[in-house]
Amino acid sequence: MAKSKSSKSKPQSTLTKADLVGAGCPEVLGRGILLHPRTFSTGSYGFSSNAKIVGEVNGQPVTYQVGVNVIGYHTNPTNALAKGKTPALSKDEFEAKTVGLLVAFDDCVTELYKHQGKPSKQGSINFFVNGKANIVIDGKTLQCSVNMNVTACGSANLPDAIEVQAE
């Protein structure tokens, strides 16, 4: 027996890109984001995570992709020495002390600055968040910068605005 297609159609979203930008960046704290240790291609080390969170705009659920990098200040040995700075932890110490370590994003952030959303080259609405964090590893505080990109999933397919037709 052949399966028939459901006559139910997916309800059309009435959200626009302007709605997403107007609503601002969703709250990222309190979402249970866990950071994993990482050595970046620059030689710096810190923590990173990718997560999906759900927010609400105009009463409709919106899924956001969140990418977070928490990079230790002066952890790139070449740059740190050139600036006369000494990292709180050497790369070897960092790698040895962070094996299997997960850090709760909420527990380490000290400052967050949310910036106005704007369309990417692909048309998705993105929000950039930066700030500062302190992560204690083996009794030593690693001061870090926070760089976060929050993208509204599927927003590239939304209209810029809904045209209202006069009657």
Image (tube, rainbow, N blue to C red):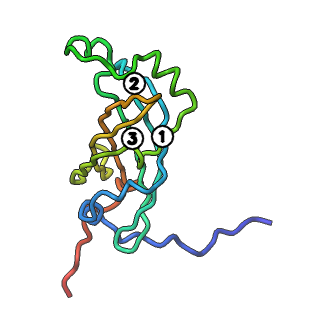
Does the residue at mark 2 contact the one at mark 1 (Cβ under 8 Å)? no
* Residue that badge 2 annotates: 45
Q: Amino acid at mark 1?
A: Val
Q: Quadrant of the C terminus?
A: bottom left
Q: Residue at x 30, y 53 (%)?
A: 125
* Vertical arrangement, residue 95 with respect to residue 19, above or below: above
Residue 116 image offset from top left, x and y in percent: 21, 54
Q: Residue 159, located in which quarter of the rendered image?
A: bottom left
Residue 7 image offset from top left, x and y in percent: 60, 75
Depth check, front residue: 62 or 40: 40
Say which label, 3 or 1, has the lower sequence index.
3
Depth check, front residue: 122 or 27: 27
Give the farthest residue toward the front: 139
Q: Amino acid at mark 2?
A: Tyr
* Residue that badge 3 annotates: 68
Q: Residues within 10 Å of mark 2 (few under 14, many from 20)?
A: many
Determine whether, in the image, residue 31 is placed left or right of residue 128.
right
Residue 102 image offset from top left, x and y in percent: 52, 38
Q: Residue at x 36, y 22 (%)?
A: 44
Q: Residue at x 41, y 71 (%)?
A: 60
Determine whether, in the image, residue 34 is placed left or right of residue 7.
left
Q: Amino acid at mark 3?
A: Val
* Residue that badge 1 annotates: 103
Q: Residues within 10 Å of mark 1 (few under 14, many from 20)?
A: some
Q: Secondary structure at mark 1?
A: strand
Camera-near label (2 vs 3) is 2
Residue 74 image offset from top left, x and y in percent: 28, 22
